[in-house]
Amino acid sequence: MDRKQVVLDMDPGIDDALAMVVALNRFTVIGVSTVAGNAPVEQTFQNAHRILQFTRHSTIPVVAGADRPLFYPLLTAEDIHGFSGMGAYTWDVPDVPHSGELAWNWMARRLTTSSVRCHLVATGPLTNIAMLLWAHPESHEHIGSISCMGGALPGSKMDKAFEFNVYVDPHAADVVFRYGPNVRLIGINVAHRALMPVSQLDRFKQFGRVGQMLFDLLQFYAVHARGEGGDPQAMPLDDALVVAATEAPELFQWEEMPLTVVREGPLRGTVVLAPYAAEREPVQVATSVDAPQFFEWLWASLTE
Ligand code: RIB
Ligand code: CA
């Protein structure tokens, strides 16, 4: 089967780093755009660059995008990912300057000049994707699908009503759910059904120098993110499931539903069924994942 042509929009972030490595093995990645989220956009930009250099994909362009959400001040997640966004890991890759072109303008240029439709894989706050859809309506017909990690499925039994990516920028998430073509959503409620036991971390070492790098990164994450999914002996891989949803949607059960987001007040970031369904394309929402199959897919992704 031909490899999908993909743009990765990420906020690396340790689980984003794993998702990026898996995506590089599974797709033809034509570019990586970065957004402020787990860390400020300068950090997420340099981290994306470092990961591409380390994995010997230095010809793939990296572009920086939004340095804050559409309306709210930026919230970051250094408690989980460290101040650099990459835990305690140190890279021997020097920082690089930005090209100066904003991510959504770069995406629009690449999408509209591509001979095939591109799939967007978004694993951070959706600010860049919202800006693309808002500022470049001509790009919509060139988008094959938008797979994103965010929110908690309406009605799911979650210990909290919101998830980081959608909480940070609920307005952007609402734009994507409203205007995005072929949107697939992996909510945190489904991501937390495929938790990785911390005891399995050693297995990453079987995959050479890249596996060792992932092991080193995930060690920090195992300490700071363990228990996030309700099991103190396991950690969520969140963003890797978005890559799986794009490449192997059969690993999931899906339901179509029109979605909107609570943007203000104490329930900010809660994903709910859109009251005016007629005005919204339904979003493909993952309702469950075959966790053993997902992990088989994940390890196979690292082997390639
Ligand atoms: O809530 C989990 C999401 O927020 C993941 O994408 C993680 O990287 C953070 O961005
Ligand atoms: Ca992320």
Image (cartoon, rainbow, N blue to C red):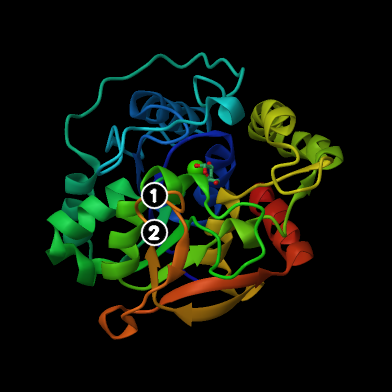
| Mark 1 Cα shell of 10 Å, populated few (<14), some (14-19), many (≥20) | few
Which residue is pictured at 21% across the width and 60% down the height?
Answer: 133
* Element assignment for label 1: loop
Which residue is pictured at 50% across the width and 47% down the height?
Answer: 24
Q: Position of residue 162 (x, y in %)?
A: 52, 52
| Horizontal side, residue 240 vs residue 34: left or right | right
* Tally of marks: 2
| Horizontal side, residue 97 vs residue 248: left or right | left
| Horizontal side, residue 236 vs residue 141: left or right | right
Q: Position of residue 142 (x, y in %)?
A: 23, 68
Residue closest to the eye, 212 or 279: 279
**Does residue 3 show up?**
no
CA separation, marks 1 and 2? Answer: 8 Å
**Does residue 212 show up?**
yes
Kind of residue at badge 2? Val
| Mark 2 Cα shell of 10 Å, populated few (<14), some (14-19), many (≥20) | some
Which residue is pictured at 61% across the width and 73% down the height?
Answer: 287
Q: Position of residue 108 (x, y in %)?
A: 18, 54
Of discs 1 and 2, which sits in the foreground? Answer: 1
The residue that label 2 is drawn on is 262
* Element assignment for label 2: loop
Q: Are marks 1 and 2 in contact (CB under 8 Å)?
A: yes
Kind of residue at badge 1? Gly
Image height check: is 215 above or below 112?
above
Image height check: is 289 above or below 97?
below
Q: Which mark is residue 210?
A: none
Which residue is pictured at 60% across the width and 23% down the height?
Answer: 87
| Horizontal side, residue 8 vs residue 280: left or right | right
The residue that label 1 is drawn on is 265
Q: Residue furthest bottom?
A: 278
- Quarter of the figure with residue 34: top left
Residue closest to the eye, 63 or 226: 226
